Amino acid sequence: QLQMALQEEKHLKHWGRLQYGLFLKGAGLSLEDALTYFERMFVGKGFSKEYAYNWRHMYGKEGKRANYPPYSCAKVINSNAPNANEHHGCPFKHGTVQEVTTLLGRLGVSPQQQKGIIAQQQSHNYQLACVEHFKVTHPLAESNPNVQTDNLGNHPNAWFHASVAYEKATGSGESSNKDGPLAMTSSPAGKELETAKGATSVSP
C-alpha cells in the first residue's frame, strides 16, 4: 500500500518514509539506489534538500550512525495508527474491511480468495490475515522446499523474501512492479528481487 500511495501521490509522510525505507533496505536496496529512486518519485518536493538526510540516516550514514532494522509485523501493528493522508501501518489492523477488500482487489485477489483473509482480519488475527494473503497468492508455496514460510506472519521482509523464492522456484513470470524501487536497483540483491511479483503487496 505504501508503494501504491507513493506512485499516486508522489510523496510519503514521515512514518511512511521510515517504514517503507527500512523495508526496502532490508529487501536489498542500496542507499545509492534508494536516493535515486525516491528523488525521482518525490516530484517537485525538493528531495535532496528536504528528504535525502532521512534516507542517509536510515542507512547509518548520518546522526548516531546506527544500523536501523526493518520493522517487524508486531512493531508495525502496535505503532501509531495512520492519520489522514498517511499510509503507514498494517492495513489489516488499521484499515476497515472495505478498505482491505478494495486493496486486495487492486492486487488481483478475487472475492472468493478474500474470504479467509477478511475472516482473520475481523477476528483481529492481523498476522494470520497476512499469512492467508500469502497462501492464496502463492498456492504452491507450502509444498515447495525452496520457499521458507515459517516466519511469514512475523515480518514483512520474510513475506517478501518468500515471495521472491516462490517466483524463482515456480517461474511464475516477471515482476508486476517494474516501476518500483527494486526494479531499478543496481545492487546484486536487488537484481534478484526484480522477480518478486508480490514485492509491494499488502505488507508493508
Image (spheres, grey):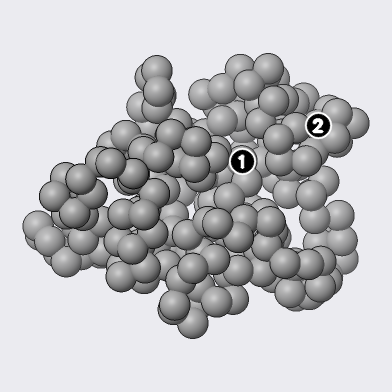
Q: Please, what is the three-letter code of the amino acid marked with disc 2?
A: Gln
Q: Residue pushed farthest front?
A: 44
Q: Residue pushed farthest left?
A: 63
> Which residue, given by chain and number where applicable, does mark 2 sit on?
114
Q: Position of residue 114 (x, y in %)?
A: 81, 31
Residue drawn at (81%, 73%) of the image:
171
Residue drawn at (46%, 71%) of the image:
185
Q: Is residue 33 above or below residue 177?
A: below
For the residue labelled by badge 2, is the local secondary structure a helix, a strand or a loop? Answer: helix
Q: Callout 1: 10 Å neighbours few (<14), some, many (20+)? A: many
Q: Residue pushed farthest bottom?
A: 188
Of mark 1 and mark 2, the one earlier in the sequence is 2
Depth check, front residue: 44 or 101: 44
Q: Is residue 193 above or below residue 95?
A: below
Q: Position of residue 69 (x, y in %)?
A: 35, 58
Q: How many marks?
A: 2
> Which residue, given by chain and number where applicable, does mark 1 sit on?
202
Q: Quadrant of the N terminus?
A: top right
Q: Position of residue 66 (x, y in %)?
A: 19, 62
Q: Is residue 78 visible?
A: no
Depth check, front residue: 126 or 99: 99
Depth check, front residue: 32 or 22: 32
Left or right of 147, for residue 41: left
Q: Callout 2: 10 Å neighbours few (<14), some, many (20+)? A: some
Q: Please, what is the three-letter code of the amino acid marked with disc 1?
A: Val
For the residue labelled by badge 1, is the local secondary structure a helix, a strand or a loop? Answer: loop
Give the Cα separation between the discs numbered 1 and 2: 12 Å
Residue drawn at (52%, 24%) of the image:
94
* Quarter occupied by residue 97: top right
Residue drawn at (85%, 29%) of the image:
111
